[in-house]
Structures are given as C-alpha cells and as structure tokens.
Amino acid sequence: MSEVGTIVKNVVEYIVTEIVEDKKSVSVDISSTSDESVNIEVRTSPEDMGRVIGKRGRVARAIRTVAQAAADEEGLESSVEFID
C-alpha cells in the first residue's frame, strides 16, 4: 500500500460521490496521518453539503461509522470532517 489511510479515503470518496448531485465538486483529502490515526476532509458544493450531513447529522454519522470500519482494516482510528 502506498499511503496510510488510502482505503478510508477511497471509501469516503465513493460514498460522498454517490450522495451528491454535483459529483465534480467533491474533494476528499487526507489532512493528516500518523501510525495510529487518519484525518479525512470532505468538501462539496454548498448545495450538496446538506445532503452529505443529512437531517440531524445522520448521514454524516453513518459516513463516519463506515470510515471507521474501513480504518479498522488498516489498524487505524479515523475522523472525518465536513468542510464548508
């Protein structure tokens, strides 16, 4: 594997891309990594951010849960931030 956290990044990117209408506006980046954790930043168009977060943050919570499951495969802890 080339970089720590790439599985988590790819999983989050796939999920977010499938949720939004403007797929070209999606940007998922690894903001920082260590031997134990990976931080993912998600950016979308302002119109799609509501879709990604969902009512009461339910979609965002689900994305974070799936990201942690992917991070477990790499033996990491993950955090996902949604940036306006």
Image (tube, rainbow, N blue to C red):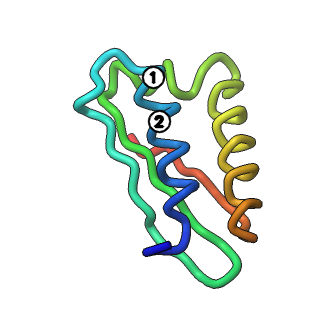
Secondary structure at badge 2 equals helix
What residue would you read off at disc 1? 18
The residue under label 1 is which amino acid type?
A: Glu
Report how far apart the C-alphas of labels 2 and 1 lie in the structure.
Answer: 6 Å
What residue is at 58 percent from the left and 51 percent from the top?
A: 80
Mark 2 and mark 1 in contact? Answer it, CB < 8 Å.
yes
Q: x and y percent of residue 74 in the render?
A: 69, 67
Q: Nearer the viewer, residue 79 or 50?
A: 79
Residue pictured at 65% horizontal, 26% vertical: 59
Secondary-structure class at tag 1: helix
Q: Which mark is residue 32?
A: none
Residue name at image x 67 percent, y 60 percent:
78
Label 2: which residue? 14
Vertical placement of residue 51 versus 70, above or below: above
- Tell me: residue 74, above or below residue 66: below
* Residue furthest to the bottom: 35
